[in-house]
Image (cartoon, grey):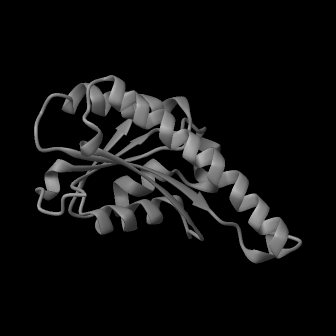
């Protein structure tokens, strides 16, 4: 990635394979496509459950392997959306992150800082108010916890 780019021209799109994350990628494609100097990183995060979730290290490794294959497929599909719409391969990259996360939102914010992105784009998950109250909403957490960047939540 070109670190010399203006932070505001570095965009992180967090995807999970849902229709809303696909809409987020398509939205960025429509809004930014054709403008020079933008760099897009499509990120998929696999949050590893605590060790007591797995019976053995073999089971954990198998779970991570399966989720990584799924995550790479999701990233490739979203990358293809941007390339088909006219993005140049050198202006787009994908990143699979496999780690324990307190919350997906915190992992996204950490990656936004690491990549020096001025914008985070995420599709709204579409959970109910009850589910949001119990589990929290990634997009809501991003809106409230992100600093020094803009957050686009695509519905």
Choose top left, top right, bottom left or bottom right for residue 68: bottom right
Choose top left, top right, bottom left or bottom right for residue 63: bottom right
- Drawn side of residue 61 relative to residue 48, left or right: right
Which residue corresponds to the image point at 46% horizontal and 31% vertical from the top-left? 22
Point out residue 105 in the picture as x, y percentages from the top left corner.
46, 59
- Drawn side of residue 102 relative to residue 39, left or right: right
Which residue corresponds to the image point at 29% horizontal and 29% vertical from the top-left? 29
Please state, as top left, top right, bottom left or bottom right, where the C terminus lies in the image: top left
Viewer-closest of 13 and 153: 13
Vertical side of 49 occupied by 2: above or below: above
Vertical side of 39 occupied by 4: above or below: below
Point out residue 151 in the picture as x, y percentages from the top left corner.
30, 48
Vertical side of 46 occupied by 34: above or below: above
Viewer-closest of 82 and 146: 82
- Drawn side of residue 29 relative to residue 54, left or right: left
Choose top left, top right, bottom left or bottom right for residue 102: bottom right
From where the camera sits, is residue 47 visible?
yes
Which residue corresponds to the image point at 89% horizontal and 71% vertical from the top-left? 55
Point out residue 36 in the picture as x, y percentages from the top left corner.
10, 38
Vertical side of 139 occupied by 123: above or below: above
In this view, the residue farthest toward the right is 55
């Amino acid at each position: 990635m070109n670190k010399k780019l203006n932070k505001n021209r570095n965009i992180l799109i967090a995807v999970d394979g849902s229709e809303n994350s696909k809409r987020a990628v398509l939205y960025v494609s429509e809004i930014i496509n054709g403008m020079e100097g933008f760099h897009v990183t499509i990120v998929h995060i696999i949050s590893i459950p605590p060790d007591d979730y797995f019976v053995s290290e073999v089971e954990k490794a198998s779970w991570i392997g399966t989720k990584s294959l799924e995550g790479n497929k999701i990233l490739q599909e979203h990358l293809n959306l941007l390339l088909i719409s006219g993005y140049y391969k050198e202006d787009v990259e994908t990143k699979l992150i496999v780690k324990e996360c307190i919350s997906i939102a915190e992992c996204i914010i950490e990656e936004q800082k690491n990549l020096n992105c001025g914008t985070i784009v995420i599709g709204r998950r579409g959970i109910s108010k009850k589910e949001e109250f119990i589990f929290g909403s990634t997009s809501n957490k991003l809106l409230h916890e992100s600093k020094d960047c803009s957050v686009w939540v695509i519905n």
